[in-house]
Amino acid sequence: MTLDGITAGIRDGLNGKSFDGSLKFDCGEDGVIVLADGDATTKDQDTDCTLQLSTGNLTKLLTGKLNPMTAVMMGKIRVSGDMSVAMKLSKLIS
């Protein structure tokens, strides 16, 4: 799945939900997805927290096939910035 497709799915999932703070999924050369101000976009910007991961692992994370804590411990996801913002992500994907 492309980042644009993933972004559209995240945008649909945000309907009726609130997310305080800003979060960036950094998929390296594939690009970024930024969650901020109740929207998801592929335009890069500074955020409170950044998750570095592959596009494949992002897809697994968002579909519940990758446990976030296990992925961090195994090095599949690297977190920088405000960890509390990353913790709020679980409310959106559960």
Image: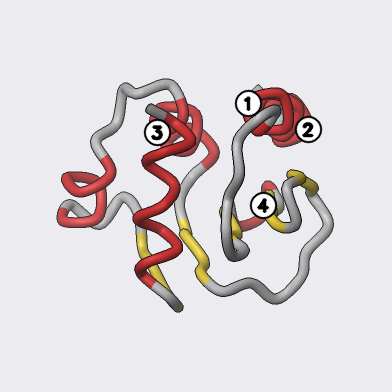
Residue in the foreground of this view, choosing between 14 and 28: 14
Q: Which residue is located at x 45 percent, y 51 percent?
A: 53
Q: Is residue 28 left or right of residue 74?
A: right
Is disc 4 surrounded by few (<14), some (14 to 19) or many (20+) residues within 10 Å? many
Residue designated by label 3:
61
Q: Which dot marks residue 29?
A: none
Residue designated by label 4:
35
* Percent position of residue 8, x then y: 76, 27
- Specify the quadrant that holds the C terminus: top left
Could you tell me how many numbered marks the image carries?
Answer: 4
Q: Nearer the viewer, mark 3 or mark 4?
A: 4
Q: Which residue is located at x 28 percent, y 44 percent?
A: 68
- On screen, residue 87 above or below 2: below
* Percent position of residue 58, x then y: 48, 38
Of pointers 3 and 4, the one earlier in the residue sequence: 4
Question: Contact, CB < 8 Å: mark 1 with mark 4?
Answer: no
- On screen, residue 54 above or below 57: below
Is disc 1 surrounded by few (<14), some (14 to 19) or many (20+) residues within 10 Å? some
Mark pair 4, 2: CA separation: 13 Å
Of pointers 1 and 4, the one earlier in the residue sequence: 1
Q: Callout 2, which amino acid? A: Asp
Mark pair 3, 4: CA separation: 15 Å
Mark pair 1, 4: CA separation: 11 Å
Of pointers 1 and 3, the one earlier in the residue sequence: 1
